[in-house]
Image (cartoon, rainbow, N blue to C red):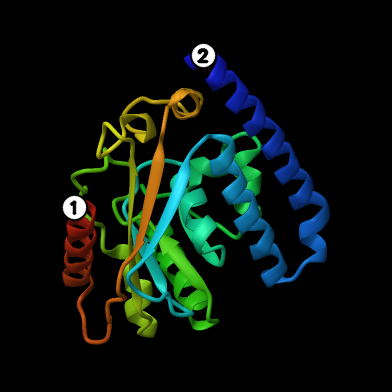
Amino acid sequence: MRGLRGLWRLLRVAAHVLRGLLTVAVVFPRRDAVGRQWHIQRWSEGLLRALGVRLSVIQEGTVAPASLVVLNHVSWLDIACVHAALPQARFVSKADVRHWPLIGWMVAAAGTLFIEREKKRDALRVVHHCAEALQRGETVAVFPEGTTGPGAELLPFHANLLQSALAVQAPLQPLALRFFTADERFAQAAQFVGETTLLQSLWRLATARGLQAELRLLPALPTEGMERRALAEATRGVIQAALLRP
């Protein structure tokens, strides 16, 4: 039964990805930013449905235009969860994702900024581009942990990318994302850690039963007069507390 459920969901995901590729190739060139965001949101919602993941969004704060969105990082599926709620967000993602078959092209078409984290100069380049995007009134989303974690305990936050918000005094918008089931507060099926491959992760998600995602939009944090390391620690504390909240 578990295997059949997984195969059926993977078939739905494959068909959904193909529809997404067609949309990016044919529809995106004819749409403005708002039109593309509509398709991004619908596609993200559809991907979650295809995998059997139920998303709930808890709004404790309002996302202002030109905000730097900061959240914890659990899985490659995090981006779909955020885009289902905030399709205007442009993500900063590691450069490896750009080379993933099919998905990399679609992620790039959604306006993703790619960073080679091992190169300090590249981080400075991306900070500059993020600051420019914020000045244009765009929403930028980053994973300051720099990699995925198990979910319950956050990894240290890197402060580099937060400099973009400080440079233009843009508000910082923390989000807390948690995958769970009736039996697990932090679902193991959603974890994309260690040597787990994308295909292995897909199979775990597709075969999971009752997997849910909870996205908390927390109150924005001011950045004026803040130092980036202090801001990183404050943001980490806010998100960690939200994840452990009953």
Residue 11: % across, % down: 66, 25
The answer, for residue 109, to whether it is visible in the render is yes
**Residue 150, quarter of the rendered image:** top left
Q: Is residue 237 above or below residue 17?
A: below
Which numbered mark, 2 or 1, is in the foreground of this view?
Answer: 1
Q: Amino acid at mark 1?
A: Pro
**Disc number placed over residue 50 in the picture, else none:** none
Q: Earlier in the sequence, mark 2 or mark 1?
A: 2
Residue 147 seen in this snapshot: no
Task: Classify mark 2: helix, strand or loop.
Answer: helix
Residue drawn at (27%, 31%) of the image: 183
Q: Residue at x 34, y 48 (%)?
A: 73
Estimate the spatial distance between the alpha carbons at disc 2 and disc 1, rounded to whole Å: 33 Å
Residue at image mark 1: 246
Q: Position of residue 142 (x, y in %)?
A: 40, 59
Query: Which is nearer the eye, 1 or 14?
Result: 1
Q: Amino acid at mark 2?
A: Gly
Q: Residues within 10 Å of mark 1 (few under 14, many from 20)?
A: few
Say left or right for 128 vs 180: right
Q: Position of residue 80 (x, y in %)?
A: 52, 49
User: Residue at position x 48%, y 39% from top?
Assistant: 53
Left/right of residue 38 with respect to residue 145 in the rendered view: right
Where is 42 relative to 192, above or below?
A: below
Q: Which residue is mark 2?
A: 3
User: Which residue is pictured at 71% across the width and 33% down the height?
Assistant: 15
Choose between 238 and 194: the one closer to the eye.
238
